[in-house]
Amino acid sequence: MVSRSLCQEVLSRAMSTGADFAEIFCQNTAVHAVSLVSKKVDSISDSTICGAGIRVFKGLRSVTASTVDMSRAGLLRCAASAAAALGEGNEQREINLRERILPNPHGTAVVPGSAGNGPRTYLVRKAAEAAYAVSPGIVQVRAGLGDWDRRILVANSEGLYARDRQIRTRLFCTAIAEKNGETQSGSANVGRLMGLEIFDQYDPAEIGRQAAEQAVVMASAGYCPAGVMPVAIGNGFGGVIFHEACGHSLEASSVAIGMSEFSGKLGQVIANEKVTAIDDGTIPGAWGSITMDDEGTPSRKNVLIEKGVLKGYMIDRMGSRRMGMEPTGSARREDYTYTTTSRMTNTYIAAGEDRAEDIIASMDLGLYAKSMGGGSVNPATGQFNFAVSEGYIVRNGRICEPVRGASLVGRGSEVIMKIDMVSSDLELGAGNCGSSSGSVPVNVGQPLIRVSSITVGGR
């Protein structure tokens, strides 16, 4: 993308007004997408994201500038702009970059960009056709396939010059079922850090069926009763509860400035002893995995909570400066126009030793939240509110009728203290997380867990 010699020149210009650190992040990403609505291909798009972001530090001050002009003149202008915003002066800095090559465990067999739109359209149609076949009550299906071929280069004034290529593919399906004049939706998706060989492992038809079956079940469901009760939260995407209610509060962007309920609590018990929580960007082929983060730090497995004890945070370079702790390979950005900050990768509650059937059997009256939807959280207080996209009443240790309109309301630090049963059926679910550095691909995950008591919103 940009030669080592040019990067050295750009970094030197960026540091010319007294910066103590400079970084250039270059990106070239090819994006392809096919979407289908109501049995017809709705759109086919191809786009490219290409540009550079230049960042300078002086103590705890930071300035970021970006440009789409990747010429020598354009990059030097961008570097000069960042330098001028930081201060005044005309220092000469000699930068000596050394290339670093990291082993990449995330091999790609079929690069999506080389396949053309025919195979993509076939895969989307297969998912949609399977969804319609589930029931005559399915009145609309939306399906889409996206792939991203992201090439990045990171160079900095400490001598780093490193490149990475991240190829991701994701298929989603949303189905709408109608019954007695009312409609309900269901959704399913699969995403991996790999090419079209993902569909050697996952059948698009199964994704379509899962979405439609959820919609049909919810269309027949009554409303969930409200109250405080035990809740079993399903595996896979159920982990969005931990991601939102606790994960963001463990990112340096909140912790370093004292805006997290977990600030200053390293080594303290913050969760039930059944809870071990991990953020691991090294899982081969996982949707949220990275070989290196967007500051060039190698990805790693970070144990956040071990048997209830807070063991670590997710830390980017600026967070490292503020906290006096080393970066953890957690710096991420949507693209070159955003400023990097600490973010999650594949974040999950680790498998436990309880049996899934025992978790359900332990509940006299409660809720089984089989599938979770969206929600909101305040990282400073941990207060959250999440929708349950597919839920069932549990009576006398048995899963009974489906219910809709359920939501889970609480505070992250309180809920993780009440996770008193954790099964062994760990799964991960793909999603995108939005924060101050844009939207990035992440996995959430957990086994089936039980929260001994939580406020359930309903009717």
Image (cartoon, helix red, strand yellow):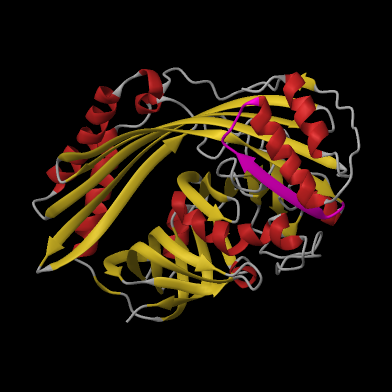
* Quadrant of the drawing holding the N terminus: top right
Q: Which of 87/49 is in front?
A: 87
Against 58, residue 308 (above or below) is below
Q: Which of 418/183 is in front?
A: 183
- Point out residue 387 in the picture as x, y percentages from the top left corner: 40, 67
Against 157, residue 209 (above or below) is below
Instruction: Kindly indicate the quadrant of the structure image that contains residue 307.
Output: bottom right
Magenta stretch: includes residue 68: yes
Instruction: Kindly indicate the quadrant of the structure image that contains residue 249.
Output: bottom right
- Point out residue 125 in the picture as x, y percentages from the top left corner: 20, 34
Q: Is residue 328 visible?
A: no
Please report the bounds of the magenta region as a residue range.
59-71
- Point out residue 444 in the picture as x, y percentages from the top left corner: 52, 49
Q: Residue drawn 67% across and 35% down?
A: 25
* Quadrant of the drawing holding the C terminus: bottom left
Q: Taking 440 as reference, is 324 left or right?
A: right
Magenta stretch: includes residue 54: no
Number of marks in picture? 0
Q: Taking 374 as reference, is 177 left or right?
A: left
- Point out residue 359 in the picture as x, y percentages from the top left corner: 47, 60
Q: Residue drawn 68% across and 55% down?
A: 251
Q: Which of 53/113 is in front?
A: 53
Q: Which of 276/171 is in front?
A: 171
Q: Is residue 69 visible?
A: yes
Against 217, residue 148 (above or below) is above
